[in-house]
Image (tube, grey):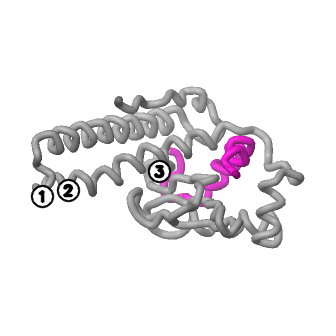
Amino acid sequence: MSYAPKDYSKLLGTPGFSETLLKNHFTLYQGYVTNTNKVLDLLAAMLKEGKTAAPEFAELKRRLGWEFNGMRLHELYFENMGGQAGLDAGSALAKKMTAEFGSVELWEKDFRAVGAMRGIGWAVLYHDRPAGRLINFWINEHDVAHPAGCDPLLIMDVFEHAFMIDYGLKRADYIEAFFKAVDWKAVEARLK
């Protein structure tokens, strides 16, 4: 069974995101899907051929995390975009943010600060279900630093490809546009 890229063309026309930027981003995402399938196919062939002790097998296993997480993080990112309404102050998510950070505004200040950090990566609001906490994390590379056992709720891509075409080096302007485009209902649906 192969993974198929999802169609996010409904995001075209999102204020703050040019068609060029979005189409380039969709193409990049499709590359992660293609490469995830290729790596999985190569690994399956090597397993059948008894080549699991080969260095190539080990490197492909390591590469799988990069490609797979690149695919999934982009899906989560695109799926938490396209909204036009702010976060409902009475929602379970807003209440949880207030309980954890003191207010939704303080949570947002923290999340924006994570997204504005120098470097490439992702800003992700995670729900640590066992502890019942919300934590904003910086994920530097797709395949490292994900907190074990936590569910991603809000994902913001802060690799340059997510904003440079439209915003150049003005990451803060991109973050502003991103917040205006968040689909809070999709984010809250991820809260378990």
The disc at residue 77 is none
- Residue at x 76% of width, y 70% of height: 100
First in sequence, mark 1 or 3: give its number: 1
Span colored in magenta: 166-192
Check if residue 176 falls in the magenta segment: yes
Q: Are marks 1 and 2 in contact (CB under 8 Å)?
A: yes
Above or below, 126 against 185 in this view is below
Q: Is the residue under label 3 in contact with that under label 2 (CB below 8 Å)?
A: no
Could you say which is closer to the camera, residue 49 or residue 115? 49
Three-letter code, disc 2 = Glu
Q: Quadrant of residue 28?
A: top left
Q: Is residue 66 above or below residue 117?
A: above
Q: Dot 1 corresponds to which residue?
A: 55
Mark 2 vs mark 3: in front: 2
Q: CA distance from mark 1 to mark 3?
A: 37 Å
Helix, strand or loop status at disc 2: helix
- Please provide percent x and percent y for residue 27: 40, 34
Residue that carries the numbered disc 3 in the rendered image? 164
**Quadrant in the picture for the N terminus:** top left
Q: Quadrant of residue 55?
A: bottom left
Q: Pick whichever of labels 2 and 3 is earlier in the sequence.
A: 2
CA distance for labels 1 and 2: 6 Å
Calculate the distance from the C-alpha at mark 2 to the C-alpha at mark 3. 31 Å
Disc 2 crowd rating (10 Å Cα; few below 14, some 14-19, many 20+) is few
The residue to which callout 2 is attached is 59
Q: Nearer the viewer, residue 80 or 20?
A: 80
Q: Position of residue 174 (x, y in %)?
A: 59, 52
In this orientation, does residue 112 appear?
A: no
